[in-house]
Amino acid sequence: MIYWEIFLAFFIPGIVGYGGGPASIPLVENEVVDRFGWLSVHEFSEMLAMANALPGPIATKMAGYIGYEQGGVLGSFIGVFAIVAPSLILMIVLLTILMKFKDSPKVKKMTMIIRPTIAILLGVMAFNFFQTSYQDSGLGQMLLIAVISFVLMEKLKVHPAFVILAALGYGAIFLG
């Protein structure tokens, strides 16, 4: 039964996660945190931070990790397959259709409607992460990490992977 649940947990975000990893992150969070209860919001945010720090697509790393945690090696394989296969099939079909109707006003309008929806989903997820961070580590620690991360990435142009690793190190030393 767990393998079927792993498949569903990643197949659904794989089908409706139009826009790649960032678009599917809130969908995966909904499945593994809210629906199946495999991870807490805090555990999910830590796993997401590690997935962002490693090279490669975010969604497949999340599916592999969570699948492994829930069902071992076979669970990992099922999770990765479930997140990748629908996207591959849908992309081939959609690209064929889009190339045929790429100049259609309806297709352009559809694309413009999808973007704000993804932005709202990412905003809600970020709010949940900040709320959990505030509860776990306090306002001061959360603001310190957020401000320093912002300055490092936006002003000093430090790669996000290094900022994530530094934040993980800070958390391990001072918050662990």
Image (cartoon, rainbow, N blue to C red):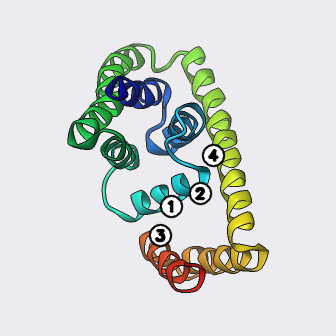
Q: Quadrant of residue 95?
A: top left
Mark 1 crowdedness (10 Å alpha carbons): few <14, some 14-19, many ≥20? some
Q: Which residue is mark 1?
A: 46
Q: Are the residues flagged by discs 3 and 2 in contact, CB closer than 8 Å?
A: no
Q: Which residue is the site of mark 4?
A: 122
What is the total number of numbered labels drawn onto the structure image?
4
Of the two numbered discs 1 and 4 in the rendering, the one whose residue sits closer to the viewer: 1
Mark 2: amino acid: His
Which of pointers 1 and 4 lies earlier in the amino acid sequence?
1
**Which is more toward the observer, 116 or 138?**
138
Mark 1 vs 4: CB contact within 8 A: no
Residue wearing tag 2: 42
Amino acid found under the numbered disc labelled 4 = Leu
- Note whether 76 is above or below 96 in the view shown: below
- What residue is drawn where x is 63% and y is 81%? 148
Q: Position of residue 70 (x, y in %)?
A: 36, 41
- Badge 3 amino acid: Pro
The earlier-in-sequence mark between 3 and 2 is 2
The residue that disc 3 covers is 160
SS at mark 1?
helix
Picture disc at residue 12: none
Q: Secondary structure at mark 3?
A: helix
The Cα atoms of the two marked residues, 4 and 3, are separated by 17 Å
Q: Are marks 3 and 1 in contact (CB under 8 Å)?
A: no
Query: Looking at this view, is 164 or 18 the one in front?
Result: 164
